[in-house]
Image (cartoon, coloured by chain):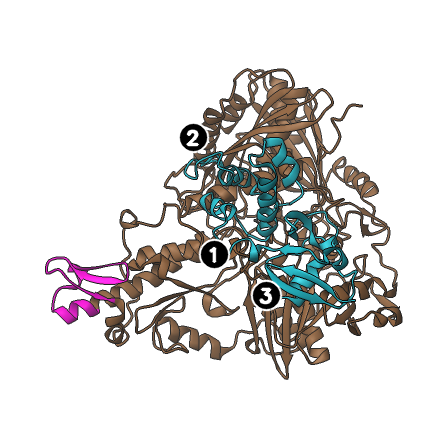
Amino acid sequence: MPIKLTVNGSPQTFDGDPTQPLLWYLRDDLGLTGTKFGCGIAACGACTVHLNGTSVQSCVTPMMAAANMKVTTIEGLSAKGDHPVQKAWAAANVPQCGYCQSGQMMAASALIKKKGKPTDADVDEAMSLVICRCGCYPRIREAIMIAAGMMPATSTTGGR
Amino acid sequence: MATTEKSLERRDFLSKLAQTGLVIAIGTTSVRRLEAADRLSRGLLASPDGAWQPSVYLRIADDGAVTIICHRSEMGQGIRTGMAMVIADELGCDYNAITLEQGLGDNKYGSQNTDGSTSMRNGAYDTMRLAGATARVLLEASAAAEWGVDASSVSTKNGVVSHAASGRSLPFGKLVARARTLPVPAKPALKSESQFTMIGKMVPGIDLMNVLTGKAIYGQDAKMPGMKIAVILHPPVYGSKVESFDASAALKVKGVEQVIEIPGTPPPSAFFPLGGVAVIASSTWAAIQGREKLKVKWSASPNDSYDSVAYRKELEGSVRAEGKTVRNLGDAPAALGGKKVEAEYYAPHLAHAPMEPPAAVASVKGDKCEAWACTQNPQAARDTIAGYLKLKPENVDVHVTLLGGAFGRKSKPDYVVEAAFLSQKIGTPVKVVWTREDDLGVGYPHTVSMQRLEATMDAGGKITAWRHRIASPPIPSIFAPGQEYHSDDELALGVLDMPYEIPNVRVEVGKAPAHVRIGWFRSVSNVPQAFAIASFMDELAHAAGKDPLEFLMQSLGPDRILDMNATGALKPVGNYGAKWEDHPNDTSRHKRVLQAVAREAGWGRKLPKGEGLGIAVHRSFLTYVASVVHVKVSPKGKVTIPRVDIAMDCGYAVHPDRVRSQCEGAVIMSLSNAMTSELSFKNGRAVQTNFNAYKVVRMAQAPRVIKVHIINSGGPMGGVGEPGVPPVAPAFANAIFAATGKRLRTLPIGDQLAKA
Ligand code: FES
Ligand code: FES
């Protein structure tokens, strides 16, 4: 039975191995390379996407778990790169190498959607799933506050 | 990340490779290319699209569009943005209208090796200013000729040349036709720095929007039409090779097409592939699954018994006996006769663990190769491919993608060579995907280090004698046999250039044979050496009953330029590829960053029980950095970090926001080194092969606040990417001591403080 799912608003049908992780379907089959590979074992968060609005690690999400679900990747977070999280990320000039940032923004947008105004502890819990080896954490924390409307985009704490 | 630009283990690796007898057709720059470069740099060659090319780094099209060629790799440090800023300012064009092209590996650009924290100080600033000035002077001369006015009376701004006196102006596009006929000046006059409007300001990164929307292309994302994916089972122990293998189960995996053996390279294997068995498939997932089904018999290796616990004992033995003296000032052994302070410090192997594991795609057709890779050094990738496949270097094109972090790992192009080898074998383009298990298991670990320090002080707390013994496998061991002692280039990273005023200093190195491919990691041997020295300075301060800051200031002695010929070093001491007269070791700059960071962090303030501040200073990559770390230790021994202050004097900050972000990242990476990370070996194999076991700092452990203080001293420009790392780990360890009275001499801290 082919698997039906929606990716960034487009209906898709998949008839390959149902145990294949969603990550490789997105990257190899659909060419959506904004979702990154970092570990393959749910230990780094680089592959974080939304499944019906909740953040999941796509490297350990088999295709069958995505059946009849809505998948959102960084490419679908907003049409023009103007999601509040993307705007906040730009305001705080967060990325260094950028490789982890799709996962960071997908995790952060799901967190804000769930909590509205996340506490420091909420940020610690949700964002500790996504490693940034370049070390952008203080700016990520600050960008989340900006995106959640808890801090103006002009005031910054990340050392600036 | 480096020792000197000229050091054997890095820039001249080709000659080392030649010594290993592995290479024949490598490293010869084609005359054709050099001539082309020379003509291009003098504006005599039309670029492929017919645009005017006043420099190899710059094209201006007939419609005035400006294209810059960035010849250094972008790995998060912001060099692409920095280069564009410099050209925009010097040329007087609109930054937002610049097109940035990433340069192929090509000698016409000079060194493209993006390490050693050199890109701005050696690669971009002067070079890009010269390129921008060349074009500006010619455009100004063209406009002046057009209007019959003096060239000195016209100026450029936002892609337009104007003549203020008459109010006339012309866009660059209208001047290109004339400019290209003019002789290129050898030494165009540069603008004065006060005329800059971009440099020194915060600018949005040139790749920012692509990163934010998932469009940025890294090595793992690169594609070529018709490419296959390869995942490789590498020998788990350095020096082991495939004896036999059974691919039948792997070949049954849907999507797996072929299984191919890659011949190994015996140690010292330099930048060449380790060998192994490659699973070629139509998708990454199939290749990963296929690899799991391989059965391989590996040959025995002399490194089969490598065991980190036993090796530490071996290194301890080395530093507890007299070693080979490399620095001998006064008579330290005699002066150490009386009551002394002594301590031993251990820092384990580290893995670079960039978030993007290495990856490359290559296509070999006949005698030509084209590759796309996340490489820090496309010239080394080109030359190593050429050597391995017996192609001419000028027939190998290496394109550089964005790098998802690198930290020194991606200076070594073994994975690019693997892709080229496999493509040559199967006749289609091949993308090699390293998984995290490859990256951590068979990478180029940072050296492991045992250091023993001994010192005596007089009644006033002045250090009278100092002995530093180091046993740490050296980087040159990947290039040549018999390299078993920490090298002079590595000792020049903090040990031979130590700034403290001490009359009797002895530095000895102990034997430390390598059992893995030792590679340079962000800040290189500054990492363990600054940890030991700055921790020991703190121990001495406490032994002398002095405040650590006051002790550091006192030990630095009077403001002065150190005489690097009078250190007692037996050989000339390296200075990151620079001359000591251009970049002296200046104690006043050490002191200035110390005082700045102490002031900003509120050094000396009273803290509640269980909290502490630690301080450290270190010069590396020609830049001076001091840090204060504030720690809080819970009764159960859990450590949190409310704040870190870091002060950097890199002379001149071209893009202060990226200097800050590099410092923030350096703080986090150094805290990973201090708190969580350790790559250990058992039976010759890496124990930690994914992020569940190889721990790095995550959001919850990261400092809540990092305050970066940039000191624009106006000194000569130093590096930025690496020098932030070394002082933070010892400042952390010193803070732990201040908070708990426990001295942290083994990294990482892990659960050393945990109480049940
Ligand atoms: S790649 Fe999925 S969590 Fe790391
Ligand atoms: S920005 Fe490089 S890993 Fe996060």
* Chain A colour as displayed: cyan
- Determine crowd level at label 2: few under 14, some 14-19, many 20+ residues with C-alpha closer than 10 A: few
Q: Is residue B570 visible?
A: no
Q: What x and y, as percent, mark residue B436?
A: 72, 54
Q: Residue A80 has which mark?
A: 1
- Determine crowd level at label 3: few under 14, some 14-19, many 20+ residues with C-alpha closer than 10 A: many
Are the two marked residues, 1 and 2, in contact with CB atoms closer than 8 angstroms? no
As helix, strand or loop, the secondary structure at mark 3 comes to helix
Inspect the image, locate mark 1, and give the three-letter code of the amino acid beneath it. Lys
Are the two marked residues, 3 and 2, in contact with CB atoms closer than 8 angstroms? no
The foreground one among B507 and B35 is B35
Q: At x 55% / y 34%, what residue is drawn?
A: A117
Residues behind callouts 3 and 2 on a single chain: yes
> In which chain is the residue bearing label 1?
A
* Disc 2 target residue: B559
As helix, strand or loop, the secondary structure at mark 2 comes to loop
Q: What x and y, as percent, mark residue A34?
A: 59, 58
Give me the chain that's brown: B
